């Protein structure tokens, strides 16, 4: 979960190539902006909030530990899920700002896309 934001920064996530490979660089920026605003950011916000409320907080409230003798606490590892979604949301905001700046001509982004070989 912690590597998802780095993968987004490196543009390493898998894309569905229905339209993306056949349009101009400017259209690719608009497709990325649409996907970030309407899919990635809302999903990350929802999943971060849900995992915080239903996974981490109940575990932290009772200081949950493993049932093994001398068991390790479980609540620190349960914090990774909401934290990972939060970090992915922050990286999504960063990518959104980069795409908007590229549309205005302030930043030059590499929008080169190689179609995967079949």
Image (cartoon, rainbow, N blue to C red):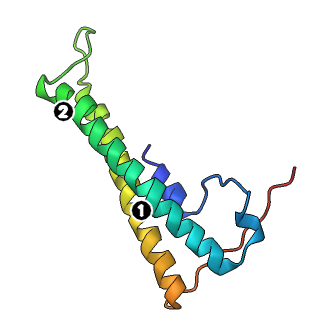
Identified at 36% across, 54% down, the residue is 87
* Nearer to the camera, 84 or 30: 30
* Nearer to the camera, 83 or 105: 105
Q: Position of residue 10 (x, y in %)?
A: 56, 63
Q: Position of residue 57 (x, y in %)?
A: 18, 32
* Nearer to the camera, 19 or 87: 19
Q: Is residue 87 left or right of residue 115?
A: left
Q: Quadrant of residue 37?
A: bottom left
- Residue identified by numbered label 1: 91
Label 1 CA crowd tier, 10 Å (few <14, some 14–19, many 20+):
some
Residue farthest toward the bottom in the current orientation of the protein: 105
Q: Quadrant of residue 78?
A: top left
In this rendering, is residue 67 above or below 76? above
N-terminal-most mark, 1 or 2: 2
Label 2 CA crowd tier, 10 Å (few <14, some 14–19, many 20+):
some
Please tell me whether mark 2 sits on a helix, a strand or a loop.
Answer: helix
Identified at 25% across, 38% down, the residue is 52
- Residue identified by numbered label 2: 57
* Nearer to the camera, 87 or 46: 46
In this rendering, is residue 54 above or below 83? above
Identified at 25% across, 16% down, the residue is 71
Q: Position of residue 99 (x, y in %)?
A: 51, 76
In what quadrant of the picture does the N terminus appear? Answer: top left
Identified at 52% across, 59% down, the residue is 8
């Amino acid at each position: 979960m912690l590597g998802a934001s780095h993968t987004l920064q490196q543009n390493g996530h898998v894309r569905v190539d229905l339209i993306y490979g056949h349009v101009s660089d400017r259209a690719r920026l608009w497709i990325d902006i649409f996907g970030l605003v309407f899919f990635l950011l809302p999903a990350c916000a929802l999943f971060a909030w849900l995992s915080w409320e239903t996974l981490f907080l109940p575990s932290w409230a009772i200081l949950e530990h493993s049932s093994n003798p001398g068991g390790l606490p479980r609540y620190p590892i349960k914090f990774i899920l909401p934290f990972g979604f939060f970090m992915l949301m922050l990286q999504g905001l960063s990518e959104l700002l980069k795409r908007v700046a590229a549309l205005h001509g302030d930043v030059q982004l590499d929008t080169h896309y190689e179609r995967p070989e079949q």
